[in-house]
Image (tube, rainbow, N blue to C red):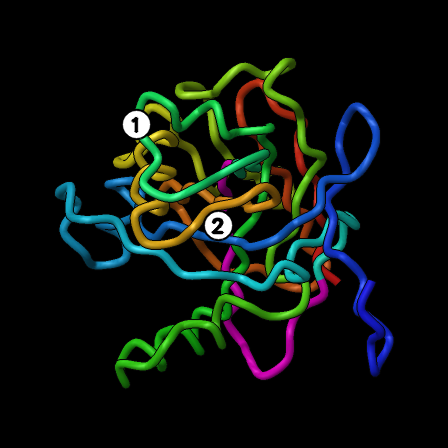
Amino acid sequence: MPEFVIPAPPQACLPVSTGGQFPVRRVYCIGRNYAAHAIEMGHDPDREAPFFFQKNPDSLKATGRFAYPPQTEDVHHEIEMLVALQSGGRDIALDDALSHVWGYGVALDMTRRDLQGAAKKLGRPWEIGKSFEGAAPVGPLMPVAQTGHPSAGEISLHVNGALRQSGDLAQMIWKTPEIIRYLSQYFELAAGDVILTGTPAGVGPVQRGDVMEGRVAGLEALRVEVV
């Protein structure tokens, strides 16, 4: 074992519904992967090449609380299905892609929309709007043995009991195997990598005191309070 010159930071982990923890290596997020969301963000919904951004592993939190972040007045919710990998590699074949999946969960891609918008206008990276402390609240991961590979069914978000986002996993422009294959052409994927697969239409702001309840068919629901 190496002798660290400072205390090693803790390993980012996610809880598992059946017990234990899933260690997180990297977090990849696909943008505009539902046509209706692409339209609401002012873009063409046609099947263009996918694009990705990353969040920090320690942005993922399973505490049931989302701390409203600093330096923003416009934080938006984006409900997503999370894919957790048990293995990886380069240039993964489409037919083999799902064999690398350990399990699935429900996540929120919280976004400082005002900071993201300002970065877009200046042609700058999005990280300041997308990757901050607690930027991805998550629910317990569920193994493939329990869930299979979800490809259709409800994905939705209620805020304070009112429906905000509603879609179907079948509406994803790029499906889970395609996402894994595409990423593996540009990165060497590995065990512990996590992928957020995009959000349906209806993204919008939250305020302190709001309660968000996210659902994906066949997975454990996610409940998060904004504090």
Q: Residue at x 44, y 52 (%)?
A: 29
Number of labels in the image equals 2
Where residue 117 appears, as percent x and y from the top left, is: 35, 75
Q: Amino acid at mark 2?
A: Glu
Residue 71 among magenta residues? yes
Where residue 148 appears, as percent x and y from the top left, is 53, 14
46, above or below 221, in the image: below
Q: Look at 40% across and 21% down and name the residue there.
A: 151
Q: Residues within 10 Å of mark 1 (few under 14, many from 20)?
A: some
> Which tag, 2 or 1, sits closer to the chain's start?
2
Q: Residue at x 26, y 36 (%)?
A: 173
Q: Main secondary structure of the magenta part?
A: loop
User: What residue type is disc 1 on?
Assistant: Leu
Q: Please state, as top left, top right, bottom left or bottom right, where the N terminus lies in the image.
A: bottom right
Q: Which residue is mark 2?
A: 78
* Highlighted magenta segment, given as a residue range: 67-81
What residue sits 52% from the left and 29% below the top?
101
